[in-house]
Image: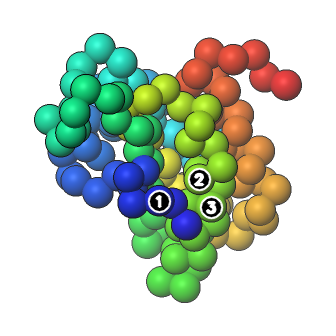
Amino acid sequence: MLPTENRLRRREDFAAAVRRGRRAGRPLLVVHLRSNSNSSDPHEAGGEAPPARAGFVVSKAVGNAVVRNRVKRRLRHLARDRMDELPPGSLVVVRALPGAGEADHDELVRDLDAALKRLLGRPPS
């Protein structure tokens, strides 16, 4: 489970990441990343940089409610392990594509890692 401070909940934050962030598409996922390195978060308390936050979009095209919730749980688990790699204050939106419902854990890991490496400017391993 993602800690509360790492969850993206507000509609405005989702919109900011999708509209003004960078995007990397993979066969199962589309990942949007907005780095807030030079702007401050209005919800931030104190002078410390806010943590990176992640949100997930899983539409009905992925499957029924059971499948959608399973995909969201898997993606939250994968994102939790990768939050330290993201710049402080960044917003990440992971949108699952229809194939994500039938994908296994390893396929989701591969697509999420490849998309994040591309967005963060790291060479693929």
Q: Answer whether residue 98 is visible to the viewer in this image.
A: no
Residue that mark 2 sits on = 80
Q: Residues within 10 Å of mark 3 (few under 14, many from 20)?
A: few
Q: Which quadrant of the figure contains the N terminus? A: bottom right
Q: Are marks 1 and 2 in contact (CB under 8 Å)?
A: yes
Q: At 42% from the left edge and 66% from the top edge, which residue is drawn?
A: 59
Q: At 78% from the left edge and 65% from the top edge, which residue is drawn?
A: 104
Residue that mark 3 sits on = 77
Q: Residue 57: x percent and y percent?
A: 42, 58
Amino acid type at image mark 3: His
Q: How many marks?
A: 3
Q: Secondary structure at mark 2?
A: helix
Nearer to me, 125 or 62? 125
State which tag comes first along the sequence, 1 or 2: 1
Q: Residue 10: x percent and y percent?
A: 22, 53
Q: Are marks 2 and 3 in contact (CB under 8 Å)?
A: yes
Does 75 sit above or below residue 83?
A: below
Q: Classify residue 14 as left or right of residue 28.
A: left
State which tag comes first along the sequence, 1 or 3: 1
